[in-house]
Each structure stands twice: as structure tokens, then as C-alpha cells.
Image (cartoon, rainbow, N blue to C red):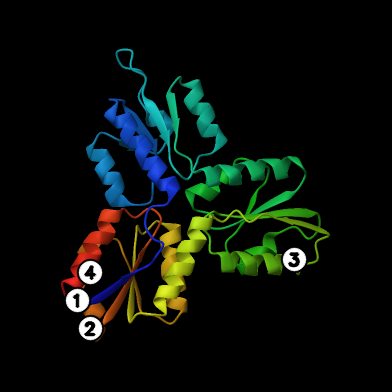
Amino acid sequence: MQVLIAQQCGFCFGVERAIDLAEQLLAAGKRVYCLGSLIHNEQAVARLESAGLKVVEEVSEVPTADNGEVPTVLIRSHGCHPKVLEAVKERGLQLADATCVLVKRLQKLVSQCSEEGYQVVVIGDPDHPEVRAAQGYGKGVMVVANEADLAQLPQTGKLAVMSQTTHGAADFGRLVGLIAAKGYTEIKVVNTICRETSRRQEAAVELANEVDVMFVLGGRQSANTRELAELCRRQGMETYHLQDWGEFKPQYVEGTKIAGVTAGASTPRWIIEQFVDGLRAI
């Protein structure tokens, strides 16, 4: 079977940095506790856990110093609420921050615009850890996931609209247009979508128009991976969102000659290579 791979896919620089930081801390013999999944990929996190990484949900779950060794709290690539940082400091724990620089930019903009009196609106998934963290940097930050959520916005005042970094650019533009049509006297729009995310989406759409079937590899919780799969489906292409080769079924490629493969920003290269090798062997 012929297999084509998207020109842009797999680990982004933010994920690479988070993985590298975790590996360095573990190699140095540190007791490392990550608040939530470091990245949205079960296999990559499992590898780190086998090297000693502990995943917890709350700072209160991190033990205190043992024999003089202070545990290290690792902040995931999606960032965290400011209160989490305060809790780490209050407990006297070491802090290692793997927050993506673009997520930090979003947090800073939320803070600045909120201080300037804007009603901050973040377009994205209200349940995503990046969005929940960003809400902590402003007062009354509102989240819009779809057109129905626009009804909750205030009728007057000035808005500052930005996006979850992994949100689809087309959907962001569409919702911004609908907000603008509501007649606010002042709207400040800041494009906080990661350029790497946009490049991956563009490459996926381009590839989807050249193949008979698309495979999008990545974790179920990965927002950018789900977005890639949805974009490919919008092209009218049969698309499968799989975590790895273990989820592949032969019927997925029946009657096809050319398969396309792309992957989310938190999908390790080895998963992509293993999947591609499996397809090519058919």
C-alpha cells in the first residue's frame, strides 16, 4: 500500500520542551510529580512514568520533603491556574514549569486585557486544561465553544476575544465574525492560535485531497488531534482517529490504494513510524 505522510505532523516545540524537561529532571534523580498528564498522549506519558514520573491531580497529593529532598512539581504544557503556583510556593516545593510559551502568551493577554477593563472571551473547549488555566488569569473570563454559547455574552461593553492555542483557525474566524455582528462598540481580537497548529491543519487538509483514506494519530484527549480528524472529514474523506497501530483494523483500508497519515502535536515520532510501517507492509 502506498502511504503518504503530512509534511507537518507530530511533536511541536512546546511538547518537545515539556518532554525534555521531564527527562532531564528524572535523569538527575529528582522526585517529580506532574499535575495532570504532561501532554495528551498516553504512550508518551507511560514512558515517563516508567522512568519515575508520578502523575497527580492536586498539589496536596505531592508529599513533603523526605530526608532533605524536596519534591519537584512539574507544570504540564497546558499551564495551570495561578492558585496552583501559589500552593506550590506555600508548601515549599520545587517548581519546574513546562508551560508552552504560546500558552503563557495567552495567559498574559488574558491578564492584561482583564486589567484594562475588557470582558475577556476565549474561544475554545471549556473543559480543556489550557482554557481552564487561562481563565484564572482574568476576572470573569468567558469561554465560547460554539455558536450557542454566544447568547451568554454581555449585550454591551468592550470585548477582548482570543483563542485556545490549538483551536481551528476557520472556526475561530467564524465565531469572531458572529461576535462582531452583534454590534459592540469596541472589540479587541488577538489571534492566539499556535502557528504550528495551523500548519498541521493546512498540511492535513492538503493531504486529505490526495488519498483514499486518512489516519490521524494521537490521544483521545488531544484537542488538536481531534481538530485534525474533523478537518479531514470535512473534506469528505473517510478518516480514522487512532491512538496507535494497535487500534488499526484491516477493513479500514479495504478497496483503497493510497493512505494518508498525519498526527497531533503530542504524538511521538515512533508511533507515526510504527503505523506507517504497518500500512506499507499490507
Look at 36% across and 59% down and name the residue there.
220
Instruction: Report the residue marked by disc 2.
Output: 254
**What label sits on residue 250 in the rendered view?**
1
Q: Point out the frontmost of discs 3 and 2.
A: 2
Pick whichever, 244 or 3, lies toward us. Answer: 3
Say whether disc 4 or disc 3 marks the residue closer to the N-terminus. 3
Pick whichever, 76 or 5, lies toward us. Answer: 5
Q: Amino acid at mark 4?
A: Phe
**What label sits on residue 118 in the rendered view?**
none
* Real-space CA distance between mark 1 and mark 4, rounded to the nearest whole angstrom: 7 Å
Query: Is the residue under label 1 in contact with that under label 2 (CB below 8 Å)?
Result: yes
Query: Is the residue under label 4 in contact with that under label 2 (CB below 8 Å)?
Result: no
Query: Is the residue under label 4 in contact with that under label 1 (CB below 8 Å)?
Result: yes
What crowding class fits label 2: few (fewer than 14 Cα within 10 Å), some (14-19), or many (20 or more)?
Answer: few
Q: Secondary structure at mark 4?
A: loop
Say whether disc 3 or disc 2 marks the residue closer to the N-terminus. 3
**In the image: residue 165, left or right of residue 41:** right
Query: Is the residue under label 1 in contact with that under label 3 (CB below 8 Å)?
Result: no
| Above or below for 119 versus 19 | below
What crowding class fits label 1: few (fewer than 14 Cα within 10 Å), some (14-19), or many (20 or more)?
Answer: few
What crowding class fits label 3: few (fewer than 14 Cα within 10 Å), some (14-19), or many (20 or more)?
Answer: some
Instruction: Report the residue marked by disc 4.
Output: 248
Instruction: Report the residue marked by disc 3.
Output: 180
Q: Amino acid at mark 2?
A: Glu
Q: Is residue 36 visible?
A: no
* Real-space CA distance between mark 2 and mark 4, rounded to the nearest whole angstrom: 12 Å
Quadrant for residue 95, please give it.
top left
Q: Secondary structure at mark 3?
A: helix
Where's the N terminus, which quadrant? bottom left
